[in-house]
């Protein structure tokens, strides 16, 4: 497969949408970010809504207007939509199942979805999770599935991700999947400038790379969307916000630059040679970092979590 096979103008994909009368948005194209924010657009697989992990900073609090109780859609609605999308979407695409829920909130349901992707060899399923429960994935290798673990420094996780699996458990699960042949990605996001943050996150990188080498790593700093701030109960994570951007409030430009450069240096010094990207950042920040993400809406030079 060459790059030409993968390159389709992002705005062409927006016309692909699959659902039923009762659930009209099971598969849809995510293209909400403005031109000032670098975010390669992608397909959402909205098989469920809400999340049991209840992270303090989670954007789902705003997206779902406070109703984050996890629930899933009936498979009798999901699977036919997938079959239709597989047939009609000609360009190889990744379907992100962790946009409106954690991908492993309901393992028995997800196992059926994962196996449906194995009926074809063009499109892939992205599992994005803070869970460590990967037992059904370990039963056999599914080559059309990409596993992506969102991890954070233990002190951050203890403070704002209280219901998630501890970061070490997520890393260990990533290792197990990588060892049997799965493509495994990692998000370190959101990165908080807590006290001694360089030491905390440096140790996290050391621990991660001592276990396995992710296929790619995506970095991100806190993003305070208006609806998130409206519905979040614990706002202690917002105390560092000083700037407004096209994708919510952020840390100051100098602080974000310092964080990203620290990670770039740390990963390079640790021997990590695979792609590293930053999530939903401004085009100005990419330029400050001396990087070229490409052109809106394609952002063809960005190798981040949700795309090829």
Image (spheres, rainbow, N blue to C red):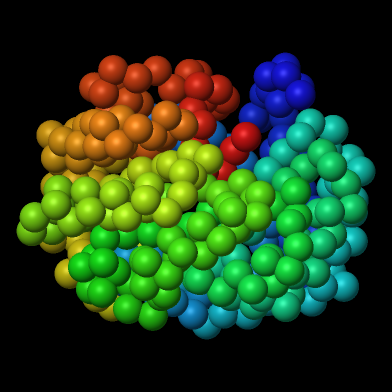
* Residue 139 screen position, x and y as percent: 73, 69
Left or right of 99? Residue 141 is: right
The residue sitting at 40% across, 18% down in the picture is 292
* Residue 147 screen position, x and y as percent: 59, 54
Q: Is residue 206 above or below residue 171?
A: above
Q: Is residue 207 above or below residue 70?
A: above
Q: Is residue 14 above or below residue 112?
A: above
Residue 219, quarter of the rendered image: top left
* Residue 264 screen position, x and y as percent: 28, 32
The residue closer to the viewer here, 13 or 207, is 207
Observer able to see residue 206: yes
Left or right of 295? Residue 125 is: right
Q: Quadrant of the N terminus?
A: top right
The residue sitting at 44% across, 22% down in the picture is 293
The residue sitting at 23% across, 54% down in the picture is 203
Q: Is residue 121 above or below residue 77?
A: above
Number of marks in picture: 0
Q: Quadrant of the C terminus?
A: top right
The residue closer to the viewer here, 6 or 250, is 6
Left or right of 243? Residue 129 is: right
Observer able to see residue 96: no
* Residue 199 screen position, x and y as percent: 14, 52
The residue closer to the viewer here, 145 or 221, is 145
The residue sitting at 60% across, 65% down in the picture is 103
Residue 94, quarter of the rendered image: top right
Residue 280, quarter of the rendered image: top left
């Amino acid at each position: 497969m060459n790059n030409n096979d993968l390159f389709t103008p992002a705005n062409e994909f927006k016309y692909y949408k699959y659902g039923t009368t009762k659930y009209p948005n099971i598969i849809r194209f995510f293209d909400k970010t403005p031109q000032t924010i670098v975010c390669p657009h992608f397909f959402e697989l909205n098989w469920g809504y809400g999340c049991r992990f209840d992270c303090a900073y989670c954007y789902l609090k705003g997206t779902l207007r406070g109703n984050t109780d996890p629930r899933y859609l009936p498979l009798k609605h999901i699977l036919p939509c997938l079959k239709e999308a597989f047939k009609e979407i000609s360009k190889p695409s990744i379907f992100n199942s962790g946009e409106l829920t954690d991908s492993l909130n309901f393992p028995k349901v997800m196992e059926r979805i994962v196996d449906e992707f194995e009926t074809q060899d063009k499109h892939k399923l992205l599992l994005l999770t803070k869970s460590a429960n990967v037992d059904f994935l370990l039963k056999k290798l599914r080559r059309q599935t990409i596993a992506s673990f969102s991890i954070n420094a233990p002190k951050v996780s203890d403070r704002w991700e209280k219901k998630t699996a501890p970061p070490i458990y997520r890393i260990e699960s990533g290792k197990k999947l990588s060892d049997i042949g799965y493509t495994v990605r990692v998000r370190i996001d959101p990165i908080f400038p807590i006290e001694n943050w360089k030491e905390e996150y440096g140790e996290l990188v050391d621990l991660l790379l001592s276990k396995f080498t992710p296929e790619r790593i995506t970095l991100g700093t806190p993003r305070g969307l208006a609806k998130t701030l409206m519905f979040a109960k614990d706002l202690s994570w917002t105390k560092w916000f000083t700037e407004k951007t096209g994708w919510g409030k952020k840390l100051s430009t100098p602080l974000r630059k310092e964080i990203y450069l620290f990670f770039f240096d740390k990963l390079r010094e640790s021997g990590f040679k695979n792609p590293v990207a930053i999530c939903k950042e401004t085009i100005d920040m990419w330029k400050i970092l001396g990087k070229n993400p490409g052109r809106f809406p394609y952002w063809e030079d960005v190798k981040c979590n949700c795309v090829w």
